[in-house]
Image: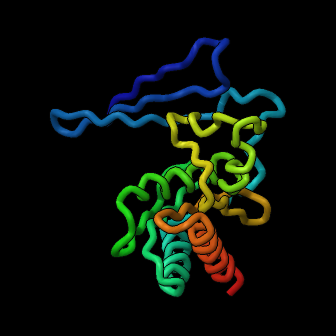
Amino acid sequence: MRSDSWRPKEDTNSYSCQRLAVSEGCRAKYLLKATADRRLPGEGMPTRNNIKLTLMDAKILLEGAEKKATEIGVPLDMAVVDEGGNLLAFHRMLGAKITAIDIAISKAFTAAGARTPTHKYGEMAQPGGPVFGIFTSNQGRFCIIPGGLPILIDGQIVGGIGVGSGTPDQDLEVAQAGIDAFLHSLST
């Protein structure tokens, strides 16, 4: 086993990286290991426990949303993203519009990233409104159409759900049903 070390210049960050090379026959694997041996005084580890959505959580959200969509008789596209707007799960019901796939994902992305329901931005983004033109941000992914809701647990944003293919009211109702099903699963 051979090891090489690499340390950043003194004026960069407070972490150092150590690269270990492990020989296996003729091939070498490199592992990066971050160490915190140069942490500044008072720079401790974060104390807040970050709650993360899992794939199981996303499935519960989608099942709750699909149940409501079936109940109202509208096939919909549904997306769930994590707190960073990264897609965790997507479901397209039979008969849902293909053109609403990207819209549902963008609604979830916007709700999680902006930490605000998409319909709130729709109201403020009208001509003359305080955020007119915001829908062009994030390479056009910022969605101001109703149907995207942030997912909060104990006041902490953990993701977003976006629903598309119905009317704005249907999309919003189904997104809320997904969140309600998820929150109910947490209390049981």
Above/below status of 50 relative to 56: above
Q: Position of residue 50 (x, y in %)?
A: 68, 56
- Quadrant of the drawing holding the N terminus: top left
Q: Residue at x 60, y 69 (%)?
A: 175
Q: Position of residue 61 (x, y in %)?
A: 55, 73
Depth order, front residue of 70/10: 70
Above/below status of 98 relative to 95: above
Residue at the far front in the pictured view: 127
Q: Is residue 64 left or right of residue 187?
A: left
The quarter holding residue 180 reads bottom right
Depth order, front residue of 27/118: 118
Residue at the far right in the pictured view: 42
Q: Is residue 88 left or right of residue 1?
A: right
Q: Residue at x 56, y 56 (%)?
A: 108
- Quadrant of the drawing holding the C terminus: bottom right
Q: Position of residue 69 (x, y in %)?
A: 51, 79
The quarter holding residue 176 reads bottom right
Q: Residue at x 78, y 37 (%)?
A: 130
Depth order, front residue of 107/53: 107
